[in-house]
Image (cartoon, rainbow, N blue to C red):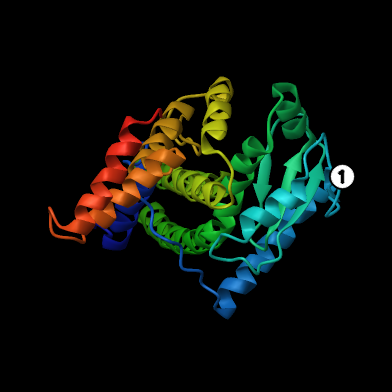
Amino acid sequence: MLKRNCAWDNACRLTIALLTAGCATPQYAVRGTPTPDESVSAVEIERAVSAVQAKEFERQGARLIGRDERVEGFAVQSIIDRLSRVTERPGLGYRAYLYKDKDPNAAALADGRTYLSTGMLDYLRSRGSKPDELAFVLGHELAHTVAQHLVKRYRALQQQQLLMAVLAAGASAATRNASAGAQQAGRLALNAAAMLQDVANSGYSQDQELEADQLGVRYAVRAGFDPKLGLNMLNDFARFDQGGPFLRTHPYTETRRAYIERYLVESGQTDTERDARLRQLRQTQTLYPKGSVSWQNLQRQIDALEKSSP
């Protein structure tokens, strides 16, 4: 009888768990404020990963966008500056780059470099988009940088490589002592480990994409952009959805929109100026005893606003 290898069994269980993680879209949640990790190791990871990714954009003819330059009518760097000032990492030195790609894409590197494809600007121009829609796109990408998703991906990959080392050791033990069937199982396990690494390199997790959505719209609102225009554009993004839910990176557009709308409503960021004033008056009113002079003065203001046209 083949002697069981505990390390092998545990590694297989971990592999199955990691392969199935991320298949289902994460549940809605309000995301906390990112706390940047500015340790030496985190900064080194940001620089190293950014250097590798930047080379790919250079091969696609990426160029720096001037600070006062308008591309397809958009003051790209100005929008990035407005957004970056309201993030949790305002001093990172965000710069905008344009690269050649017919598909509408955007990406932000860990060191603050932000890339827009020519296809993205063509797409926005064809829609007659306002700067608010571009701010929606850029806010999402900057959120990946602020939340240090690339650093987290890198560290997760390190853990997966350790797991694969355990898998390799277990597979080796199995193939030395097992039948042909067990040898095949060992090879399949090693192939699964290789696929796991490929998935880790393919993009952000769905949870990270949803976090970037929420943080990005938060930054857009803080910077004075209209989130409703971004949501209108997101509706059109639905036609770019492809494939099934298994091992997707971006969640389905319908889910993204629903989660963003829920966040905006719950946080009061879709309020009109009148709604915001009513909310403020009601909150202030709770500070005074009901029926007091101050409470009544506030109530009169509330009544007047409620009778006014929305």
Q: Label 1 neighbourhood size at 10 Å, few (<14), some (14-19), many (20+)?
A: few
108 left or right of 72? left
Residue 181 drawn above or below residue 166: above
Residue 178 visible, this angle: no
Image spot of residue 50 (x, y percent): 69, 60
Q: How many marks?
A: 1
* Identity of the residue furthest to the bottom in this view: 40
Tell me the residue that label 1 is attached to: 61
Residue at the spot 59% in from the left edge and 43% down from the top edge: 225
Identity, as a three-letter code, of the amino acid under mark 1: Gly
Left or right: 60 as drawn, with respect to 52: right
Residue 72, quarter of the rendered image: top right
Percent position of residue 158, x then y: 50, 64
Q: Is 205 positioned to the left or the right of 65 in the image?
A: left
Which percent across, then down, holds residue 5? 28, 60
Q: Position of residue 168 (x, y in %)?
A: 45, 58
* Residue drawn where x is 57% and y is 58% of the image: 150
Task: Tell me the quarter of the image containing the C terminus.
Answer: top left
Answer left or right for 236 relative to 24. Answer: right
Q: Residue drawn 29% across and 57% down?
A: 10
Residue 163: tell me if it is visible: yes
Q: Which type of secondary structure does the marked residue at label 1 adopt?
A: loop
> Is residue 250 depicted above or below 288 in this figure?
above
In the image, 147 versus 242, the foreground residue is 147
**Residue that protrudes farthest toward the top in the picture:** 239
